[in-house]
Image: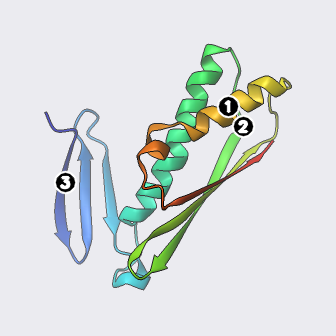
Amino acid sequence: MPTIKSSYLGNLRTESEHLQSSVKILTDAPIDNNGKGEAFSPTDLVASALGSCMITIMGIVANRDSVSLEGLTWEVTKIMQSSPRKISEIIIDFHWDSPSSDPAMIQKLKNSARTCPVALSLDPEIKQTLNFNF
């Protein structure tokens, strides 16, 4: 059974629906690639998925150890190369104002982020730079 149903809306825009939840996402080509840049580009979604996957796995580990990740935020920077046009690097800056005081837990969270399914699925040529600001 499919997970996502998508359609082309014209003008370099797509719509994808997550079938279980009915949540929809629009994509638009970026301005530097003939689009309007009015929504996530497909490569933006890849970069965003990496950060979301990492925090999800960190959350699973934290929940198992009764640690709250409240206040944890992250910023994603996607770097494209021009020829061939593809993602060359994804930089994720994690920020946490109230981290766990247990150094072992902090290391466990960092390690878990690196083993999320998206991180393991991306081409090894895509550099994944992680900055844990906590």
Left/right placement of residue 130 relative to residue 48 reads right
- The amino acid at mark 2 is Gly
Q: Give the distance between the C-alpha atoms of the residues marked 1 and 3, in whole angstroms.
A: 34 Å
Q: Residue furthest front?
A: 124
Other residues around mark 3 within 10 Å, as few (<14) / some (14–19) / many (≥20): some
Find disc 3 in the rendering and name its residue: 6
Looking at marks 3 and 2 on the same chain, the residue that comes earlier in the sequence is marked by 3
In percent of width and height, residue 101 lies at 86, 25
Find disc 2 in the rendering and name its residue: 71
Please tell me which residue lies in front, 78 or 26.
78
Q: Is residue 52 above or below residue 77?
A: above
Q: Quadrant of residue 57?
A: top right
Q: Secondary structure at mark 3?
A: strand
| Number of marks in the rendered image | 3
Q: Give the distance between the C-alpha atoms of the residues marked 3 and 2, in whole angstroms.
A: 34 Å
Q: Give the distance between the C-alpha atoms of the residues marked 1 and 2, in whole angstroms.
A: 15 Å
The residue at 46%/43% (across/down) is: 120
Q: Nearer the viewer, mark 1 or mark 2?
A: 1
Q: Which mark is residue 109?
A: 1
Quarter of the figure that contains the N terminus: top left
Looking at marks 1 and 2 on the same chain, the residue that comes earlier in the sequence is marked by 2
Q: Nearer the viewer, mark 1 or mark 3?
A: 1
In percent of width and height, residue 129 lies at 64, 56
Quarter of the figure that contains the C terminus: top right
In percent of width and height, residue 60 lies at 56, 24
Please tell me which residue lies in front, 102 or 36.
102
Contact? badges 3 and 2 (CB < 8 Å): no
